[in-house]
Image (cartoon, rainbow, N blue to C red):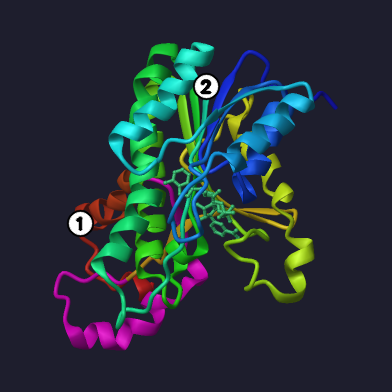
Amino acid sequence: MSEIRLDGQVAVVTGAGRGLGREHALLLGARGAAVVVNDLGGALDGAGGEASPAEQVVAQIRAAGGTATVDTNDVSTPESASRIVATATETYGRLDILVNNAGILRDRSMAKLTPEEIGSVLDVHLGGTIWTSRAAWPVMTGQGYGRIINTTSAAGLFGNFGQTGYAAAKAGIWGVTKTLAIEGARNGIQVNAIEPGARTRMTENLLGDLADRLDPSLVAPVVLWLAARECATTGEVYNVGGGRVARVVIAQTPGFFSREITAEALRDGWDALNDPGRAEVMTTFQQEMGVLVGLLADGDPSAVADA
Ligand code: NAI
């Protein structure tokens, strides 16, 4: 089996001083990429900062024979995110791979949450993903090549108690991923997201007996594969953890259709409309629109769910 190599390529991994980002950076570095190890080294809630987490990862990559440099800029503002990309271009002359991984947690139920908490979580996760991508975009477009791997979460895709801000940010990242995949296609830029599960300081109190089986190093191979030149996938989200990888899809039931739609007809057709048994995976909004356009053009007035 030939090894996937990234020799001559340059990668930025945000939040790479610890946890998942650290494993992504170590693996990309081990496969030949020059790695910008970005991490401002703050607490789990984003407070404070120190260079040592990023420095230690850089030292580890170099000790293994790789190439890496420290970057301690904050992902969450347009200006500082641009400086992260500048570290890559000024140090190594290009940027092939951007892994948006940096994150904080400030969980709070709706009754107690504050604008400041919501704002900082949105700024780091969603803002950080957008601003680093925006800074990388002209570089990757100029090269006609780029790979962006974003980090979403089950909380964003399915919701989770106490995580309004985090879920909003992570759901936003999913939308950003889909949109940048569309915009990047003409310039060889592929954009995907992972929805990870791993033992890190973010989850150490949540995983119970399974913690030992959820080493963060089990997520990094998916990032390497999505970053590889030979991977042609774009616009997808993968659930990754403990050695399992699965594609997450949006599906839609055939639904109900009647030009004389009434609440009563909906009531009577509700179970059929909601039955996922005949749901279809939807990958583009044109595909989704096409279903309605087809129904309107055919003029079939019958309730589709009953067909
Ligand atoms: P972690 O707390 O171990 O690592 C996150 C790193 O991001 C830290 O080293 C931190 O200093 C850095 N960081 C935070 N704010 C930053 C900023 N503004 N600029 C630059 N760096 C910053 O957490 P973990 O678990 O490794 O999380 C990585 C990503 O994976 C996050 O986006 C998280 O939301 C996501 N995730 C993790 C899951 C898990 O099971 N561990 C589950 C779902 C999503």
* Magenta stretch bounds: 256-284
- For the residue carrying disc 2, how many other residues have a C-alpha within 10 Å: few (<14), some (14-19), or many (20+)? many
Q: Is residue 183 visible?
A: no
Determine which of the numbered discs, if any, sits on residue 15 in the image. Answer: none
- For the residue carrying disc 1, how many other residues have a C-alpha within 10 Å: few (<14), some (14-19), or many (20+)? some
For the N terminus, which image quadrant? top right
Viewer-side residue, 48 vs 291:
48
Dots 2, 1 in contact, CB < 8 A = no
Q: In the rendered view, tell whether residue 91 sits above or below residue 279.
A: above
Q: Residue at x 38, y 22 (%)?
A: 186
Residue wearing tag 1: 296
Quadrant for residue 53, please give it. Answer: top right
Secondary element under disc 2, as helix, strand or loop, is loop
Q: For the residue marked with disc 2, what is the amino acid?
A: Asp
Residue wearing tag 2: 96
Drawn side of residue 43 relative to residue 53, left or right:
left
Drawn side of residue 174 relative to residue 38, left or right:
left
Drawn side of residue 57 relative to residue 162, left or right:
right
Q: Residue at x 67, y 48 (%)?
A: 219
Drawn side of residue 130 relative to residue 298, left or right:
right
Where does residue 306 sit, x and y in percent of width and height?
A: 37, 76
Quadrant for residue 228, please give it. Answer: top right
Q: For the residue marked with disc 1, what is the amino acid?
A: Leu
Q: In the rendered view, tell whether residue 244 sits above or below residue 134.
A: below
- Which of label 2 and label 1 is nearer to you? 2
Quadrant for residue 185, please give it. Answer: top left
